[in-house]
Amino acid sequence: MTHVLAVLGGGKADVSVIGTAAAVAEIARAQVQRVSPAGDLSAQRAAGQVLRALHSPGTLLVVLAGDELSRPIWWRVVQRSAKPVVLVPAAARGRRAEIRRVLLPLDGTAESAAAVAETVEQFARAGVDLVVLHVFDAETVPRFWDQAAHARGVWEDEFLARFCAQPGARLELRSGVAGEHVLDVAQAERADMIALGWSRHLDPGRSRTVRRTVRDAVVPVMLVPMATG
Amino acid sequence: MSDGCGGLIGRTAEAVAFTWEGAAVPGGRCPVGPVRRRVAALSAVGVDVAVISDSDVPHVDGQLRLRPTGPGRLLLCVNRGSEMFEAGSGGLGLLHRRAGGPTDSSDSMRDILSFLARRGVWPGLVLVVGSDFGSAGGVAGSDSRLLMPEAARVIAVSVGDEPGGVPAGVLHVGGGRSAFLRLLDEQLSRRRRGRVADVDEDPAWILRETGIDPLRHRVTESLFTLGAGGVATRGSVEEAVAGGAPVVLAAGVYDGTGPDQHLLPGPQWTGLAVEPAPAQDVRVLDLRSGVLARTETGAGGHPLRSLRFASVTSPGVVALRAEASAARLRPGPALLRPRGKAMTSGRQDGRYWATVGSDRGGGISALAVQQTRRDGLVRTVERVAAYAACPWRGSRPGQVAAALSTAGDLGFDRLLAEHRAAWAARWEAVDVRVPDDPAAQLALRFALFQLWCNTTKSRAELALGARGLSGIGYAGHVFWDADVFVLPALVSIDPAAAAAMIRYRLRRLKAAQAQARAAGWRGARFPWESAAGGEDVTPPSGHLGGRVVPILTGQLEEHVTADVAWAAARYAEWTARPARFGLPLLLETAGYWASRCRPDDAGNAHIDGVIGPDEYHERVDDNAYTNVMARWNLRAAADAADRAGLTDGRSRRWRELAERIVDGYDPATGRYEQFAGYFGLEPLLVADFAAPPVAADLLLGRERVAGSQVIKQPDVLMLHHLVPGEVAAGSLVPNLDYYGPRTAHGSSLSPAVTASLLARAGRPDEALTMLRTALALDIDDLSGTTAAGLHMANLGGVWQAVLTGFAGLQVRAGALSVDPRLPGAWGSLQLRFRCLGRRVRLDITRGRIEIGTDGPLLAGLAGEVPRRVAGRASLGRPG
């Protein structure tokens, strides 16, 4: 039996954490396992407890509150976990916990696509609507865009074929800074979750999209560590 | 080396060369009958055989006593390499004799390889059997002479004792004459059992893809497209794979209407059931022979192997052989339904037939036969299919039946042999050699190969879409790419195909006239995007990244009309064909510009509200490219009208108007203003925000780019490329200096033309850097869209860059001029091409330029009076 870990802190966030964990567990055909680190533990030890539970072979991922209050814990978990971590922001409280549509920001590298591939497949199998977001910035902008009447079709077909070959997946393209578009597109598309591959690199200038998304999202954010991280 | 089917070498050779005294009749004491029977049998199944002997011809011929009727040829290479005879049904004929100087068996080998090369049989397909390759007592074996450098990659086998071992690359099987006979038997058996042929993996001629990379899968499908006679098949693997996009397309056969019009997918013929599917493979596109080969790697037992081709000698006929362990390989139906389209199909008299019809009344029909055989545990599948396609008629059973019958009479092996020979003949006439730059040479050959794959039968018209027949991208719509980028290349490769492209436009002249009338003008206005009927099929909207944008090219990118006329003139110029072939195009397009120009009060003429080749700026007035091309069009048409004896006064009016068209040229700076007001835009350079090539409009946004001087691709500079006589003398460099840093190269058309311009400006090293980008565009998938098909304009562009850019070829008034600019990395450049009805060879080095022609030709260095040359001649030293 596989599990989705729900980390409860005894606060207001617990309801949304449990709800999100249940929704994810349904997609993953797993059961929810609750973990409640003792309240008197330091953030470091609480995170350690979560990571140990997460390390268990039957545990698929962990769901925990992603609010500012819990930051000392979840930030440690996010940095050290080799398994996906779902952060439920404070703003998501009160939302329905169903996951019918997921936004997948992909940067067009094999690494980020590979990171979320298994998760994406599970979403697709469960009939979740997949919306892929790719943002053209100085590093990812195509070299050529021949005829605007045709270019998008051929570019999009190949991008999806390479990085998200799931039936029904559709692509949203934007230009600019990725972090600026993820939240807008999530909102415009009424996404119930944002799933991001992430490198676990925290050097200055890295993981800006992840940081910004986690900070400002109003829906749960799934961070899927890249293998190279 | 054995493949487990009882063979000694496990490979299929197309020719066998052996030593008479060493391998066949050692010591002269063995009966010749067994050799004679096998040689006769090999010849009968199409294998060429060469006997190498130190003796004279009466001795060898007297022993062998064989006059095979073919199709395999029998060569007797005798007298220690001094003579080569052919023995055939017509008797014994001398092919070659070396006079003077010592000769040895290496000369025989050279003669054999040279003979075979003309038949498209390259060293890697030649089995060489001897008995004395190894050294003994420090003395090299006598047969080691057969392995001179030109014989690299031959399948060398020794049946001798070889006490000192054999050199690297030689397979020692020993066993003397009996092993020799078994080697011949193995080749006979492999032929008869339909084993898959080999390819000669000469690195100068092959594209090799190792492994199964899902990110490259669809890219290689495009790269490995094979086509002939107007029908092409993407290089998809035989088994169904996730993400694969196999398709068969036919030139000019469209489905749908209006902007949704797209190339119709035909029945698929390459599908096989292979279970389990290969996990790893090596795929080799042999440009020299026009075949695509595949070998499964990492699998034990009997790996999947396949070889396919689109017959050049029987256009429309395609053939495939595959083999694998019988438990894994099943042929299934020979013709499969294309994705997303209905197909009627059936089986009759052992043949598979299928038709896919278009809703425009046309269709693609196919008829196929297949045969399965066993060779021990190996199952072989042989499939031959014939295609017929028509834009306006559906099923064509008679045509495909006749083609298939002809192909069937020949048989797979002979069909392949003729196909190889035809490709050898193509490369004999058209080729490029850059000894110092093998990567560029290979990529250029790839461009030539794929341009050939998109040609069609000589009398037909050729609708050549932006991605040709290598993919469904851009819906197969025909743009100015065809006229300005592909045609100038094809006219030097396959003039008949270039003529077919002109014919495509000629047959749509009425539609172009109707389009002009509908817009309130006279003459003919050709559409920005064209498909079956010749009406404009440009979609009304598109996407700039994620943003929906109106598409105005169909309304405003009018220069295509002059481009069509230019193509007709270029064809006439390069072929020396009478200009009347394309005359209606020149006259009617000139008529369009005559009505389209707006006179002002000062007597000047303007063209308002257009889009130039730089599509970042829309609805501009007096675009220099459009105006100067219109001016050229008027003048060229006036000249043509005079030559045709048209005395209605048109030519005078056109010339007068041409004089009044403004072109934005400023003599003080030597620059042309790209359009009225361009110099007043934000002076943004590409280096300020990105490294080119870059789709600047995606990065900066449409409005920002439109308000800046950043341009997508050469616009003013296209004039220096296409009509250098229409621009001010000496204006190339100032315009290159000005527009170069402003060019994002965000169009795939841009790098190749820029390479050509840089070379002409005397900057060949910069040109080579740009050329490398163009050469990598599809092979390295720089656009991320090669999966949807190859960029045909770029393929034509790189060939133009070499011909007109680096070699500096121009044809004017029936004479060829040469003005090379070689980059520092290239010590020499050798070109073969067609021009003025001749086959021309140019050998360009830093010290001299030599020309070779197959008939009289006016040629000379640029700036000199051309002179009549025939055969080989020196044109002098590069300037």
Image: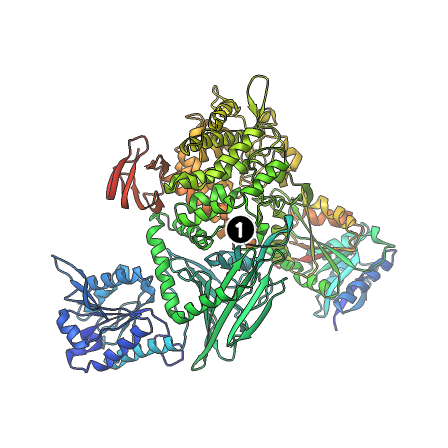
Which of these two is toward me, B233 or B513?
B513
Task: Identify the residue under disc 1.
Answer: B467
Is B255 left, or right, of B574 in this rendering? right
Which of these two is toward me, A194 or B829?
B829
Where is residue B613 drawn, in percent x and y? 55, 36
Q: Is residue B293 above or below residue B776?
A: below
Letter of the chain that mark 1 sits on in the rendering: B
Residue drawn where x is 22% and y is 81% of the image = B33
Is B17 left, or right, of B200 in this rendering? left
Q: Quadrant of the N terminus of chain B?
A: bottom left
Amino acid at circle 1: Arg
Instruction: Judge whether residue B714 can be spotted in this image.
Output: no
Which of these two is toward me, B204 or B474?
B474
Q: Residue furthest front?
A: B648
Identify the secondary structure beneath mark 1.
loop
Where is residue A133 drawn, in percent x and y? 69, 51
Where is residue B335 drawn, in percent x and y? 54, 69
Which of these two is toward me, B147 or B521?
B521
Q: Quadrant of the C terminus of chain B?
A: top left
Q: Which quarter of the picture shows residue B64?
A: bottom left
Q: Residue furthest top?
A: B602
Instruction: Judge whether residue B382 can be spotted in this image.
Output: yes
Q: Which quarter of the picture shows residue B760?
A: top left
Residue drawn where x is 60% and y is 39% of the image = B515
